[in-house]
Amino acid sequence: MAKSTSMKAKTLLKGRALQVAAGAALLMASTAQATEALTIDVHRDANCGCCKKWIAHLETNGFKVNDQVEANMSAVKQRLGVVPRLASCHTAVIDGKFVEGHVPAAQVIELSKRSDLLGIAVPGMPAGSPGMEVGDKRQAFEVIGLSKAGTDEVIAEYPAN
Ligand SMILES: [Cu+2]
């Protein structure tokens, strides 16, 4: 009797080891996927300096940026569903969702987990946001999410306390 119990325990252990191995393989696969998902298209005007600085911020944080110079940014915003109240300078697209303005890389990464959102935005051009550094000036700003229903949600507040 004792022998069969110990056999059962061994089989369970073996099963558990297999589960752990499978879990590790899954984890590795999802890490590879996350790296791929970091490709982002950025639409901007030719002479936009702060747009280029924001692109540099993304690249520093591991993104691969497809830089696209546009003749008509308001047409691009309209096409991508950026409502006028959320508008800024450049408009990026990742996984079919828009990223409007000087959004910090952390929120761009979090956007991949939000299938309920059309996109996120930092409206205007607040000083101190990524790509809008003006000496030590730190203007408070919010990252706003636009839901598929058309409502706004505050995703993050800066400066973070
Ligand atoms: Cu700007």
Image (tube, grey):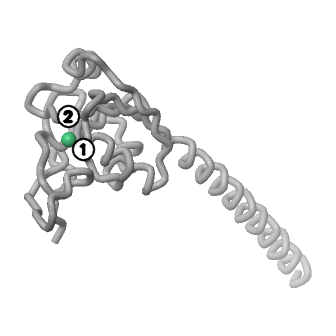
- Report the front residue among 110 and 56: 56
Q: Which residue is mark 1?
A: 50
Res. 93 mark: none
Check whether the beta carbons of the residues at disc 1 and disc 2 lie within 8 A of each other. yes
Question: Which corner quadrant holds the C terminus?
Answer: bottom left
Q: Which residue is mark 2?
A: 89
Residue drawn at point x = 82 percent, y = 68 percent: 14
Q: Position of residue 121 (x, y in %)?
A: 21, 40
Q: Quadrant of ligand 1?
A: top left
Measure the C-alpha gap from mark 1 to mark 2.
8 Å
Residue 74 in sight here? yes
- 69 is higher (above) or lower (below) than 10: above
Residue drawn at point x = 14 percent, y = 51 percent: 142
Of all residues, the one furthest to the front in this rendering is 47
Residue 118 in sight here? no
Q: Position of residue 11 (x, y in %)?
A: 84, 69
Q: Position of residue 160 (x, y in %)?
A: 18, 66
Q: Nearer the viewer, mark 1 or mark 2?
A: 1
Q: Left or right? Give the position of 160 relative to 34.
A: left
Residue drawn at point x = 78 percent, y = 69 percent: 12
- Report the front residue among 92 and 35: 92
Residue drawn at point x = 41 percent, y = 34 percent: 94
Element on which disc 2 rests: loop
Q: Left or right? Give the position of 65 relative to 49.
A: right
Element on which disc 1 rests: helix
- Label 2 lies in ligand 1 vicinity (Cβ under 8 Å): yes
- Label 1 lies in ligand 1 vicinity (Cβ under 8 Å): yes
- Report the front residue among 31 and 100: 100
Dot placed on the residue nearer the N-terminal end, 1 or 2: 1
Q: What residue type is disc 1 on?
A: Cys
Tally of numbered discs: 2
Q: What residue type is disc 2 on?
A: Cys
